[in-house]
Amino acid sequence: MTVPEVEVRDVPEDAYLLDVREQDEWVAGHAPEAVHIPMTQIQARVEEVPSGRPVYVVCRVGGRSLQVAAWLNRLGREAINVGGGMQAWEHDKRPMVSETGRPPVVA
């Protein structure tokens, strides 16, 4: 099964953006509207992921998000991998926030 993928610039502003990075990566910098469920927790928390709408999955560079998107698609969800991950997000100067009190970075 091929996983659909979009470039960062093609992620809609009102997208459901699922960030599957670890807690320390999330705290350092993330998209303001993203929902955080680490890859290691996704199986236990899958019911938190909406069905019936596209889910854009992002990680640091795109590997973990590809795996999660493939798994969600096998469950019948509509999951799309965000190519290049948060590194591409930061490079494209998309909005980011941090939980550290310092400027956001992709860790």
Image (cartoon, helix red, strand yellow):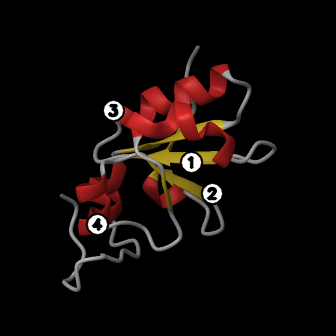
Question: Split into 4 quadrants, where in the image is the N terminus?
Answer: top right
User: In the rendered image of this protein, does residue 87 appear above or below residue 57?
Assistant: below
The residue labelled by disc 1 is 56
Give the Cα distance between marks 3 and 2: 19 Å
Horizontal side, residue 2 vs residue 41: left or right:
right
Q: Could you tell me if the residues under marks 1 and 4 are in contact, i.e. CB atoms within 8 Å?
A: no
| Marks 4, 3: nearer the viewer | 4
Sort mark 2 into few (<14), some (14-19) or many (20+) by Cα contacts within 10 Å. Answer: some
User: In the rendered image of this protein, does residue 75 appear above or below residue 38?
Assistant: above
Sort mark 3 into few (<14), some (14-19) or many (20+) by Cα contacts within 10 Å. Answer: some
Q: Could you tell me how many numbered marks the image carries? A: 4
Q: Residue furthest right?
A: 52
Q: Earlier in the sequence, mark 3 or mark 2?
A: 2
Question: Split into 4 quadrants, where in the image is the C terminus?
Answer: bottom left
Tell me the number on the disc at residue 27.
4
Tell me the number on the disc at residue 29.
none
Name the spot of residue 41 as percent of width and height, x first.
Answer: 45, 38
Instruction: Specify the amino acid type for callout 3.
Output: Gly
State the SS at label 3.
Answer: helix
The residue labelled by disc 3 is 63
Name the residue located 30 percent from the left edge and 48 percent from the top edge.
Answer: 22
Instruction: Specify the amino acid type for callout 1.
Output: Tyr
Q: Could you tell me if the residues under marks 3 and 1 are in contact, i.e. CB atoms within 8 Å?
A: no
Q: Nearer the viewer, residue 5 or 35?
A: 35
Instruction: Specify the amino acid type for callout 2.
Output: Tyr
User: In the rendered image of this protein, does residue 53 appear above or below residue 106?
Assistant: above
State the SS at label 1.
Answer: strand
The residue labelled by disc 2 is 16
State the SS at label 4.
Answer: helix
